[in-house]
Amino acid sequence: MAPLEATDWSPLWISLKTSVTATLITLVAGLAAAAWRERHKGPSVALVDGICLLPMVLPPTVVGFFLLLLFGRSGPLGRLLLQMGTTVIFSWPATVIAAAVVAFPLMYLSARAALEQVDSHFLEAARTLGASEWRVFGQIALPLAWPGVLAGTILSFARALGEFGATLMLAGNIPGRTATIPIAIYFAVEADDLRSAFAWCGADVVISLALLSGLYYWTHARGPARWARR
Amino acid sequence: MASTIGPTRGGLRAGPGVDMALEVHIEKKLAEFTLDVSFAADNEPLGILGPSGAGKTMLLRCIAGLDDPNRGRIILGNHTLLDTDNGVRVPARKRRIGMLFQHYALFPHQSVRDNVGFSLGRLPRAAREQRVRATLAQVHAADLEPRYPRHLSGGEQQRVALARALASEPEALLLDEPLSALDTHLRSQMEAQLRETFLAYRGPTLLVTHNIEEAYRLGARLLVLSRGHVAAFGPREEIFRRPPSVEVALLTGCKNISRARAVSESLVEAIDWGCRLRLRQALSGPVGHVGIRAHHIDFAESFDPGPGEENVFPCWLASSSETPFRITLYLRLHKPPDESGNYDLQAEVFKEKWERFRDRPLPWHVRLSPEWLFVMPS
């Protein structure tokens, strides 16, 4: 049995901090990629599609391995960072990178589906009214696609929160720095600390359930925004 | 007369009193044909008439910059919007062309105020609001300002879309089937609105429609488009009075067309109708067909081919169909109809007139007045 001691809450904070940061990065990157993809049709962009979706189908350990190669001391990005006097492996940013990469496909898919559904006549009308492409995107496409983008954001957050494999490989298990909830659970079970494992599992279920119900409420019960019914 | 019909190339009318002119030459390969259109428009509304799929909407899209022709030159006033030979292509947002989309495309997440003010982002708030109010008042929609598109009727949406296009102070106005999404009752209301707007608007106005009467009522000049080419272009009266080809006659709703050959200078033989027809004017070229519109067919009191009674022939009623105020009579010339129900002519008469001769014994005597007959080349 684990000794009675003050509970270490750091995995919760690390998990939330990591997931929020990773989700924000994913949101921007996913939207940018989806918006870019909307403008470029044809067979050649199928490769881009494939690369964007790869992290979703590959085992997280494979993603983690590639990230290690990329960010390791001899990896291209790792060397660049080293020249700048820093490294991300086994540090908190590594948890963010791992979570963002793994959550990215969900954001990309949702954003693309949502942007695709926006009637192109709205965008064309905005152009004839003198709007720049940034304004067309920001004031017309994005607000109209928002319910889908929001759903993608919540899914990405949930996925980032649950990220384990790639995080372990890239960030390791450093309590108080890179140990997220899933990693804390794994090492609690390994250390036979079932009480902590139960607690963290419970916390994970509660957070995920709240997120998914919130998602359902926002996209269905409240309707895809008030104005979307035409 | 006939020289005013048909595509004019570079025949741009400009001068004092003409604020803006639009000159368009476009070639664009489409799936089934090539859109190849040249015309010039001034401040008189130009109706672009053609069947579905003739390329009308694509033509507007190319002018607005929403689609690119393979080759083309578009000049609006002093600005060259497109010149593929010299690599000029102004993007849609800088063309200053107001476009009214078929289903209006009002931004659903913005209020009427924001929709109409969308193009006025650069103005200070007070000036913008004032312009929005003034433009909405212009289309009799001032009370709609705080509402959202989903709460508007079709006619109201159209007014707001029109106001949105006008608020940007476009240098040309393009309307794509503006009335097709409305029911009959709203149509005449909105048609009046459009006429009013056209009168006040100083700039080329292009109106695309497949409705013959709408095109005629709203467009002082007409451009008839068929499978991507200009079948006729000119004043509406001229095109309806003397269609330059069978195609245009059919597209402008002519129901009676017969193959024909010249007999003498002002006499043709209508082959399908089995009769000779006197024309008002001497023939000026080769004859392929002769035609007369259904409502121009008249009935003579009796068959008495005197000097004033030309082109009168006996006919029998094959069938008929009624609308509230008019009746369409399907007539067989020279002999009673047979089992097949075939007919030679289609005549449209007001019911009052029909009441007067419906009980007369057959055959009746149909008069194809030289005044209304027109000939077309083959």
Image: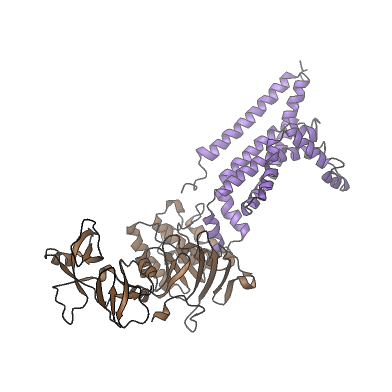
Chain colours: A purple, B brown
* Rendered residue at 53%/72% (across/down): B25
Query: Where, quadrant-wise, is the C terminus of chain B in this rendering?
Result: bottom left
Query: Residue B257, relative to residue A69: is it above or below?
Result: below
**B110 w.r.t. B267: above or below:** above
In front here: B202 or B369? Answer: B369
Q: Relative to B67, is B47 on the left or the right?
A: left
Query: Could you tell me residue B57's position as x and y percent?
Result: 48, 62
Provide residue B132's location: percent of width, then percent of height: 49, 63
Is any atom of residue A9 visible in this view? no
Q: Nearer the viewer, residue B284 or B253?
A: B284
Q: State left or right for residue A140 relative to residue A68.
A: left
Whether residue A71 is visible here, answered yes or no, is: yes
What percent of the width, then of the height, locates residue B237?
A: 35, 75
Outermost residue toward the top in this view: A1
Quadrant of the image for the N terminus of chain B? bottom left
Using the rendered view, name the quadrant where residue B182 is placed. Answer: bottom left
Residue B194 x %, y %: 40, 67
